[in-house]
Amino acid sequence: MFFELPHWSKLKLRHNLDVMHVEKNVFDTLVGTILDIEGKTKDTIKAHLDLKRMGIRRGLWMNRDSDKARRDLAFFSMNPNDKKRFLKFVSSVKFPDGYASNIVCCFRHDIVQVLYKFEMIFPPAFFTSIMHVMVHLPEKALLAGLVNYRWMYPIERLLGELKKSVRNRAKPE
């Protein structure tokens, strides 16, 4: 429908990527996989079976113990002691306001290189469409301007406040 509009081809910014949800999903995927969080990790039994089916990364294939297949902790996942040390470190990190989120300073080439290196480490299931969207973030940031004018944090915060005021959840209006 949008592609048929006469002005569509002239638009420089056809899609406004919601940076808040992109960063949340990328973070969930990366940290969930590294910390091996149930339900968040992309390092699943199915992912290991896919690797074997594709005949790649033999070191990540499933181990067979008698009749059962078991998934060992992958080399990129952390054991419980490493998880504690990592979380302690992350909780101590402090950045000046806006410093750690300035996506314009990241060049598209750098993001592509990081994703390329991730491909050498993580299973194919790790690479969801949201990982590809990261490649386009610097370009969109340059076209659309400052991220804080178009991200969803204020709206999500407002919706959270409105949700608290609902008395009858069956009829929130």
Image: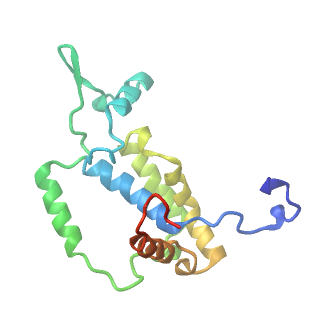
Along the viewing direction, whichever of 5 and 109 lies nearer the viewer: 5
Return the x and y of residue 30 as percentages of the image width and height.
36, 54
Q: Quadrant of residue 9?
A: bottom right
Along the viewing direction, whichever of 147 and 116 lies nearer the viewer: 147
Q: Residue at x 39, y 72 (%)?
A: 164
Q: Is residue 53 above or below residue 131?
A: above
Q: Is residue 171 above or below residue 64?
A: below
Return the x and y of residue 91 as percentages of the image width and height.
21, 71
Question: What color scheme is it?
Answer: rainbow
Along the viewing direction, whichever of 147 and 54 lies nearer the viewer: 147
Q: Residue at x 39, y 44 (%)?
A: 120
Q: Residue at x 70, y 68 (%)?
A: 13
Return the x and y of residue 36 as percentages of the image width and height.
26, 46
Q: Quadrant of residue 125?
A: top left
Q: Is residue 162 left or right of residue 122?
A: right
Return the x and y of residue 152 as percentages of the image width and height.
51, 71
Give the mark count. Answer: 0
Q: Residue at x 47, y 71 (%)?
A: 159
Which residue is at the far bottom?
Answer: 96
Q: Is residue 48 above or below residue 135?
A: above
Q: Is residue 51 above or below residue 153?
A: above
Which residue is at the far top?
Answer: 67
Which residue is at the far left?
Answer: 81
